[in-house]
Structure formats: structure tokens, C-alpha cells
């Protein structure tokens, strides 16, 4: 999608629930948006940005649609990338969850998508809210470690394998080696400034997809001591983030298994709180000035 310049107009398919657009940085990847009805390309105004990352099922348009009502109520632009399976080798499913593939940095692809949206819609998003379910939760908390300065909050929903906020453990079990992996050192203080919401269903007890054996790069000694469910993994991640100094909220949703669309309410609640706090602070600043 070419950035608009003076005199150019956006197309019908760039408003509301948009079509899928190829990433300008790497056309193997694409994204869709929701742009609130109030958006006026002649007077773009100000909006917050929400980025939602799909799970292994890669249902990007449906995920975007689940955010429409919230986006209208809270005046947010919603960006949902699509990271297809089979990038690098046939059948490959998981590289995006760790931000790095054989010839791609998924974190940098996302950041360029954000920049592309800023240019196209003449908006500015210094920071954004990031959330993801399952595989998307993998991406979300690892992106937090790599780029904390770009986030004003995260909601991490039902990750199966976690990277602890622990500088003594090697990547991806912990954050030691982050600099060699991403070219930037782990910044514990910057990570701690990002409010962190964690969500899981209380019936999410299947382990067939998330067992990690000793010898795997993602194996964390002791993390399986209380079991290998997503609930225990989430608890371990929450404890790790609290020790780092993060403000952490944990929502255990009753009667829900590994079902992402039944776990959105806590994410919406956490995001709404952050948005309204930010607007309140902004109004106080305007009054004082």
C-alpha cells in the first residue's frame, strides 16, 4: 500500500474493516486493519493503536473483527498482521513466535507495518498496545523484551512456552543473549515500565502441544515442576515479570479451555483502563498548561 501524498485519496478498501495489504518491507507478509468510522483523511485526528497477533491457526481477519466494537468505543486503530506458515521451509509453523526465522526478523516486519500505517493514514503511534493468543502470546511477550520502548501495555493470552524475564537463562528460556539475537541489550527498567496483563482459561490443561524436554533451547529448569499446562507456564511468567518490577495483572477465566475468542474480555478491560488513564493524564496536563 503506497503512502498517500497531498491530493491523493484513500480507497474504499482502506476504511473500516480493510482488505489484506502486503507488507511493503516483505511481501510474504500482510496485514489488515480496522479504522474507526470517525477517521477523516483530511483531518486525521488522534487515535491509539492496538496490534493483535494471531495464533498458529492464523485467523487474522476474524481476529481483527473481534476488536471492531471496542475500536469504535475507544477510538483505536487495530492492526492484525498475517505471518503465513511455511516461510523458509514447507510446513514451518513456529518461527514467528520467537521473532526470528532463517531469513526474516518478524519483529522488524511488524514495526515497519506500523510505520506504513502511520504514513498512509497520517497518524503517529509512538507506542502501541500489543496482544496475542497462544502463538500470538509467544510473540507478544518476546517482543516486549526486545522493544519495550514501543509499547504502552501488553496482554499475553495463554502462551504455551514462555521466555522468563531472567538474565541468567539463555534465550529463549530467558533473556540472556538477547543482544546477540536482536542487536540490543535487555533493558529491565524499560520492560518494567510496560503494564502487563496475563490471561488463561482455568480449563486450559492440555499439554500435547507445549511439552518441552531437557535439551531444547526453550527448556527452563524447574518450570515444569508444578506441571506443564498453560496455567502453570503463565504463573511462572507472571512471577518472573513481577520480580522484574512490572505491574502485572492475571486473569484466570472460569470454564474456558484453549479458546482465544472466549478470553478477550480481560484484554479489553486492561486496555480500556490504560487508555482512560492516559486520557485523564492528558486532560490534567492540558488544564495545568
Image (cartoon, helix red, strand yellow):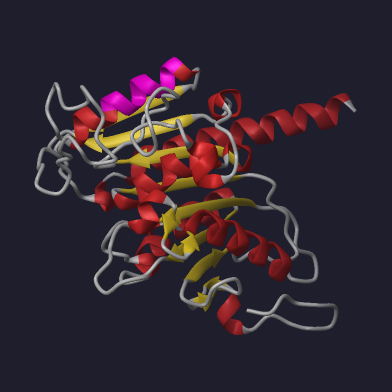
Residue 226 as seen in the image, left or right of residue 42: left
Question: Where does the C terminus fall, quadrant-wise?
Answer: top right
- Relative to 182, residue 87 above or below: below
Q: In this view of the protein, can residue 107 be seen by the observer?
A: yes
Across and down, in percent, residue 82 comes to 42, 67
Task: Say which residue appears at 49% left-offset and 78% top-offset.
Answer: 19
- The residue sitting at 52% across, 54% down in the picture is 107
Q: Relative to residue 72, is residue 172 drawn left or right?
A: left
Query: Front-most of 21 and 102?
Result: 102
The region drawn magenta spans 235-243
Q: Is residue 54 visible?
A: no
Q: Position of residue 87 (x, y in %)?
A: 36, 71
Q: Position of residue 284 (x, y in %)?
A: 77, 26
Residue drawn where x is 81% and y is 77% of the image: 5
- Residue 57 in picture, x, y percent from top left: 26, 63
Q: Answer whether residue 238 is magenta in the image.
A: yes
Which residue is nearer to you in this view: 288 or 171? 171
Q: Quadrant of residue 219?
A: top left
Total numbered circles: 0
Q: Is residue 28 above or below residue 220?
A: below
Residue 251 sits above or below residue 71 on the image:
above
How would you classify the magenta stretch by its main secondary structure? helix
Q: Quadrant of the N terminus?
A: bottom right
Amino acid at each position: 500500500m503506497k503512502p498517500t501524498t497531498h491530493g491523493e485519496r484513500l480507497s474504499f478498501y482502506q476504511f473500516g474493516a480493510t482488505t489484506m495489504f502486503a507488507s511493503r518491507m516483505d511481501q510474504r507478509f500482510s496485514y489488515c486493519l480496522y479504522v474507526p468510522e470517525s477517521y477523516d483523511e483530511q483531518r486525521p485526528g488522534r487515535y491509539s493503536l492496538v496490534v493483535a497477533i494471531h495464533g498458529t491457526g492464523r485467523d487474522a481477519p476474524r481476529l481483527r473483527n473481534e476488536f471492531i466494537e471496542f475500536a469504535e468505543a475507544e477510538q483505536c486503530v487495530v492492526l492484525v498482521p498475517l505471518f503465513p506458515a511455511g516461510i523458509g521451509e514447507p510446513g514451518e509453523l513456529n518461527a514467528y513466535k520467537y521473532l526470528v526465522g532463517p531469513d526474516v526478523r518478524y519483529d522488524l516486519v511488524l514495526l515497519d507495518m506500523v510505520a506504513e500505517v502511520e504514513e498512509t493514514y497520517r497518524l503517529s503511534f509512538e507506542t502501541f498496545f500489543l496482544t496475542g493468543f497462544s502463538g500470538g502470546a509467544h510473540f507478544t511477550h518476546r517482543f516486549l523484551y526486545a522493544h519495550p520502548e514501543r509499547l504502552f501495555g501488553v496482554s499475553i493470552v495463554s502462551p504455551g512456552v514462555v521466555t522468563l524475564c531472567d538474565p541468567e537463562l539463555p534465550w529463549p528460556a530467558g533473556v540472556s543473549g538477547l543482544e546477540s539475537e536482536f542487536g540490543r541489550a535487555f533493558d529491565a527498567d524499560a520492560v518494567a515500565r510496560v503494564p502487563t496483563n496475563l490471561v488463561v482459561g482455568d480449563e486450559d490443561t492440555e499439554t500435547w502441544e507445549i511439552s518441552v524436554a531437557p535439551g531444547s533451547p526453550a527448556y527452563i529448569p524447574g518450570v515444569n515442576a508444578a506441571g506443564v499446562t498453560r496455567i502453570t507456564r503463565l504463573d511462572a511468567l507472571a512471577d518472573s515479570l513481577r520480580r522484574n518490577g512490572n505491574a502485572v495483572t492475571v486473569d484466570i477465566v472460569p470454564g474456558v479451555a484453549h479458546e482465544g475468542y472466549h478470553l478477550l474480555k480481560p484484554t479489553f478491560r486492561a486496555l480500556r483502563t490504560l487508555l482512560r488513564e492516559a486520557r485523564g493524564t492528558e486532560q490534567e496536563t492540558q488544564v495545568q498548561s
